[in-house]
Amino acid sequence: MSATSISSSADHASSKSRTLFVRTSEPVLFASLQFVPSNFDYLKGGQPLQRAEHLKCIEAFCTFALLFTTEKRQMKQFTLAKVTALAVLMAVSATASAAWPDRPITLVLSWSPGGGTDATARIIGSLMEKELGTPVTVVNRPGGNGVVGNQVMASAKPDGYTIGLMSVEISMQHHMGLTKLTPNDYTPLALMNFDPSGVTVAANSKYAKLQDLLDAAKANPGKLKASGTGEGGIWQIALAGMLNSLGIKPDSIRWVPSQGAAPAMLELAAGGVDVVPVSLPEARSLIDAGKAKPLAVMSDKPAGLYPNVPTLKSLTGSDWTMGAWRGIVAPKGLPPDIAAKYEKVLDKINHSKDYREFMTKQGYGVAYASGKDFATFMAKSDEAMGKTIKALGLSKD
């Protein structure tokens, strides 16, 4: 059998790019692979890669290809091009995976700056930078009740350089005919947060108590207006479900779509809407500024941020609860080794002092599930939302 040799075109210290030549004495195979030092010779921080292992991988494949083509020359479909392409693919895949991350990461979210999803994304991004040693850029892609950003996440290349902070809307949108995307279109990495819905009105509102608001909705269906997310978003479902649980028609309070909690709260303070059912942490800035007041929280226990705000059940007897969850996902097809690295980092971030202190200070709830457990959580959320949306007459399934 002919010998196989591997050589390099430039020395380790000085090359700007490196060409590896894989040759045999047979004319069947010649592979030339281009790598830059940051991808092949080094990991971030100057740690050397196990270069010899990559070369052995190439050499082993070339040896196999030579044997195969020598003994089976009549099988013309096993061409030089196919052998070379596969050798290149194997080498590049192994090198790229081992070197990850060697460039900035983009963290996409589907909502506008200023809301709970935005704040959660930014604390995760800042802590991830420290753990991975590479910049993490948070990018807001609002629109279509979260569909625009979710599509960006799903359509990105699954190489670990684009991830997203997914929100509960992914378990709702397809039931309402807004998109074909479902939780199955992503690689789940970690559940990071859960916050129940509140019922917040302007500080100067004539509705001093929740019952006052409910009575007005029953007496004048369609007169009151609410906002907090796009059409069919989590906070619209929260409000409609609450009304339905109390025997009030879900559309008695008219929904005004918005690009998220922050713009909805500004509209509330300006008098453009009467009630905003976003989470209390998202309403916090205007509550603390004395421009808004919470009447209730849709949870089975008081909110940690405002423990004196009564629960819906304590005021009305309704068992209705609703909240928003958020978690990190990647495009479907993320390599398992990169997914494992993300899961390890996100586990550390979620349980870190910095993350928990930030979330507690902001009033955000902390939740955690990684990998398969997060996938199970999303599947259950999707099933439950489907039933709720159908019961409210909003399903397009």
Image: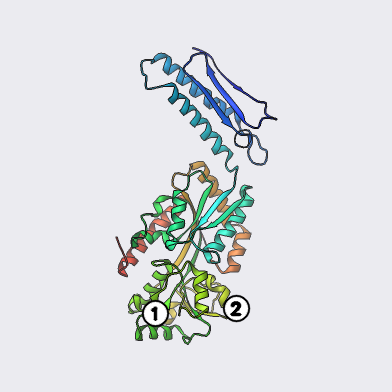
The residue nearer to you, when weighing 375 against 87, is 87
Q: Is residue 294 above or below residue 116?
A: below
Query: Eyeballing the image, is 263 above or below 336?
Result: below
Please rate how many residues cluster around mark 1, counting C-alpha atoms within 10 Å: few if below 14, some from 14 to 19, many from 20: few
Q: Check disc 2 and report the residue beneath it.
A: 289
Name the front one of labels 1 and 2: 2
Q: Position of residue 60 (x, y in %)?
A: 51, 23
- Is any part of residue 373 visible from this angle? no
Residue at image x 59%, y 62%?
356
Q: Is 89 left, or right, of 397 in this rendering?
A: right
Helix, strand or loop at mark 2: loop
Residue 247 vs residue 257: left or right? left
Q: Earlier in the sequence, mark 1 or mark 2?
A: 2
**Residue named by callout 1:** 317
The residues tagged by marks 1 and 2 sit, at their Cα atoms, a distance apart of: 31 Å
Give the amino acid at mark 2: Ala
Please state which of residues 371 and 207 is positioned toward the viewer in this rendering: 207
| Residue 143 figure quarter | bottom left
Instruction: Give the quarter of the image for residue 52.
Output: top right
Q: Who's the residue at 31% across and 66% down the image?
A: 390
As shown in the figure, which amino acid type bears the numbered disc 1? Gly
User: Along the line of sight, which residue is nearer the eye, 285 or 348?
Assistant: 285
Asked if residue 329 can be seen in this view, the reply is: yes
Residue 331: mark in rendering: none
Q: Tell me residue 116's x, y (percent).
A: 53, 65
Horizontal arrangement in the rendering, residue 232 relative to residue 36 (left or right)? left
> Quick one: SS at disc 1?
loop
Identity of the residue drawn at 61% across and 29% down: 18
What kind of colouring is applied to the model shown? rainbow
Q: Position of residue 279 (x, y in %)?
A: 49, 70
